[in-house]
Amino acid sequence: IYGEQAIIGRVDGNEFAILLPAERAPRSPDDLAASAKALGYEIDVGGRSIDVSFSCGGAFSQDGAADESFNDFFARARTALREARMSSADHAAVFYDGDLDRRERIARTLENELVHALARDEFFIEVQPKVAMNREVSGYEALLRWRTTEGELVPPGVFIPIAEANGTIRTIGLWVFQEVCKLAATKEFQARGLRISVNLSRQMESGTLPDMLAKICLDSGADPGQIELEVTESWAVKDFSRGSGMLERLKAKGFGISLDDFGTGYSSLGALVRLPVDIIKIDRTLLPLDVADNVDAQKLLGATIDLCRAMGREVLVEGVETEEQFRVLAESGCDLAQGYLFGKPRPYEAVPGAAEAQEKPSTLVSQAS
Ligand code: C2E
Ligand code: MG
Ligand code: MG
C-alpha cells in the first residue's frame, strides 16, 4: 500500500508500526483508515477466515527539531493509537495532537484524585423527584456529585467510568447507598411513604453485595421496601443467569429493582421479560422534545410502554421537560415520570428529612469487595 520506502515492524503481539517518508504518509485520519480498510475485514489463516479490524494511530515527526528523539515520536503515535482503540468503529484512525496528551493527563489526575475524594468528603448527593401522573411526588432518585478540592464540579458521566475502571466505585457506591438509607430512615420519609432509588454499577456486583446492602439498610433503620436499586441492562446481558440471580437475591432482601435507561441497550426482549425487575425506566431518548407532533415517536413510546405494562411492570419515563411531553405521557398509560419539569436534581438538603438524616454519623464504609 505504501510502497518500497515503507518500513514495517511488529511492535508487540497484535501491534505493528509503519514508518513512512512524509510525502507517502496519509494526509488525514480518514486516509489512514482507508488504507487499513484496503486490507479488508477478513484474513485467511490456513483456510479459515478470521474477522479483523485495525485501530490506527498516526503521528508526524517534528520536522527539523534536532532534539526530537525517536522514542518521543513513537510515543505520540501510541497515544493516538490508544485513543483510536477507545472508538467503537471498525478501522478507527486518530492522528496525534497536543490535546490528546492533555486529555490523558486530565484522566490520570482525576483517577488519582478520585481515590482520595471519599476521605476528603468531596462527594455529595443530589436528589430528583419522581412523580405519579397526578404530579404527586412518590419518591426521589439519588444522584452522585463530586466537587474536587479545587472546587471543580466533575460530571458523573466523567468520573463514574473512571471509578468503575479502577474499582473505587465499590466503596463510593456503598457510601451513596448508606446516605440514601439514612434519608429513607427519617421520620419524614417514613411518614410520607416516600421511596428513594440509588444507581448501582455492575462493577459493584459481588457475591456479598445483597448481604452488605441489607446490613447497611438494617443498621440505618430504613425499610428495604423504601429503597429501589437502579440497574442497567448490562447486569443481565453479560451473563444472564448470574445477573438475574443477583437481582433475585437483592429482591429477596426486600429491595425494589428498577431497570434504568431502558431502550438504549441491545438485549433481547426475551431476556428482559425474564428479568426480576419491578419498575422499568424508559430512557429519555424515547421522549423527544417534539413528541407531541411526532407520530412515529409517539408510536414507539406508546408501544414500549404497553410492552412494559404487559410484562406486569411499573413504567417510569425519564427526561420529561415540557408540559406537551407530559400530556403525551398522561395519555399513554405510564405510571411515573421524572424530569426537569417536576424538578432538577437538587442538593439533598432540600429534601424533607434531610436535617434529621444529617445528624446521623457517616461511618465511612470501607472493605467494599
Ligand atoms: P441516570 O441514572 O439515568 O440519571 C438520570 C440523569 O438524567 C441524571 O444525570 C439527571 O440529572 C438527568 N436528567 C433528569 N431529568 C432530566 C431532564 O428532564 N432532561 C435532561 N436532559 N436530563 C435529565 P446525571 O446526574 O448527570 O447522571 C448521569 C448518570 O450517572 C446517571 O444516569 C447514572 O447512570 C450515573 N450516576 C449518577 N449517580 C450515580 C451513583 O451514585 N452511582 C452510579 N453507579 N451511577 C450514578
Ligand atoms: Mg438512574
Ligand atoms: Mg436513566
Image: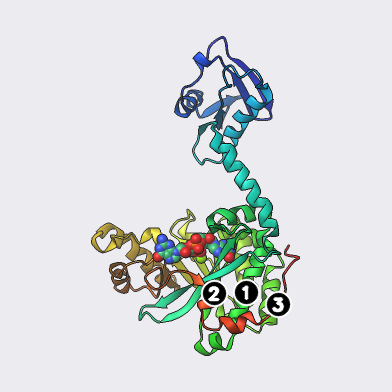
Pick whichever, 257 or 122, lies toward us. Answer: 122
Q: Which mark is residue 179?
A: 1
Pick whichever, 129 or 62, lies toward us. Answer: 62
Dot 2 and dot 1 residues touching (CB under 8 Å): yes
- Dot 3 or dot 2: first in sequence order is 3
Q: Secondary structure at mark 3?
A: helix
Amino acid type assigned to the residue bearing label 1 in the image: Glu
Residue density around tag 1, few if under 14, some if 14–19, many if 20 or more, within 10 Å: many
Pick whichever, 51 or 166, lies toward us. Answer: 166
- Dot 3 or dot 1: first in sequence order is 1
Residue with the mark numbered 3: 215
Amino acid type assigned to the residue bearing label 3 in the image: Lys
Horizontal and vertical percent for residue 200? 59, 65
Quick check: 288 above or below 108? below
Write the residue at 28% across / 68% down: 324
Q: Which mark is residue 348?
A: 2
Residue density around tag 3, few if under 14, some if 14–19, many if 20 or more, within 10 Å: few
Q: Determine the image quadrant of residue 20.
A: top right
- Dot 2 or dot 1: first in sequence order is 1
Quick check: 9 above or below 51? above
Horizontal and vertical percent for residue 168? 68, 58
Indicate the colouring scheme. rainbow
Farthest residue in the top direction? 4
Q: Secondary structure at mark 1?
A: helix
Horizontal and vertical percent for residue 81? 58, 33
